[in-house]
Image: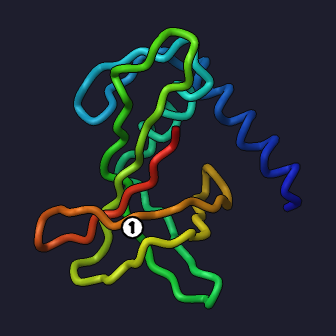
Amino acid sequence: MKGSEMRNDRRDFLKTAAAVGAGTVVAGVTTSHANSPRGAEIDAYSAHLGSEFTFSLSNGNGFKAKLTEVNASSNTPAGHRHPFSLVFTAADGLEVPQEVYSINHPQFGHQQWLITPVDGVASQTRLEAVFG
């Protein structure tokens, strides 16, 4: 699939997800993003909480992690983009450096995100991608 086709498929999906509902539960808090393109993304990712994403580096090394949180900023002025973050949980003891990873998911396709390890439970490796 070419890059432009993938972007169009993703846009179509996000438009559909936005049409399904303007409100959703995000990280345990009900939020509304009816007038925000970022809100559509937040809602789309929230619908996939618990699903598995594949993370890969250019050297071929990779791992899988589950989407465990979608956190939306509540302090966004009207007319501005809604910043949000995605938090993933990977296998215990996995050492993951801050790096740009190729991310694959059946619904969202192939993307590249800066992933940062974050503190969490000792038995889990937690990773975060922030979108502003």
User: Label 1: few (<14), some or many (≥20) within 10 Å?
Assistant: some
* Count of labels in the image: 1
Using residue 71 as the reference point, say whether residue 54 is left or right of it. Answer: right
Of residues 63 and 107, the one drawn nearer to the viewer in this rendering: 63
Of residues 70 and 47, the one drawn nearer to the viewer in this rendering: 70
Asked if 33 appears above or below 64 in the picture, the reply is above
x and y percentages locating residue 85 in the rendered image: 41, 44
Asked if 86 appears above or below 24 in the picture, the reply is below
Question: Residue shown at 65%/26% (left/top)?
Answer: 16
Using residue 121 as the reference point, say whether residue 41 is left or right of it. Answer: right
Q: Which residue is mark 1?
A: 65
Question: Residue shown at 61%/18% (left/top)?
Answer: 19
Using residue 42 as the reference point, say whether residue 95 is left or right of it. Answer: left
Of residues 20 and 64, the one drawn nearer to the viewer in this rendering: 64
Quadrant (top left/top right/bottom left/bottom right) for the N terminus: bottom right
* Circle 1: residue type: Ala
* SS assignment at label 1: strand
Residue 92 sits in which quadrant? bottom left
x and y percentages locating residue 32 in the rendered image: 42, 15
x and y percentages locating residue 107 in the rendered image: 61, 50
x and y percentages locating residue 53 in the rendered image: 48, 63
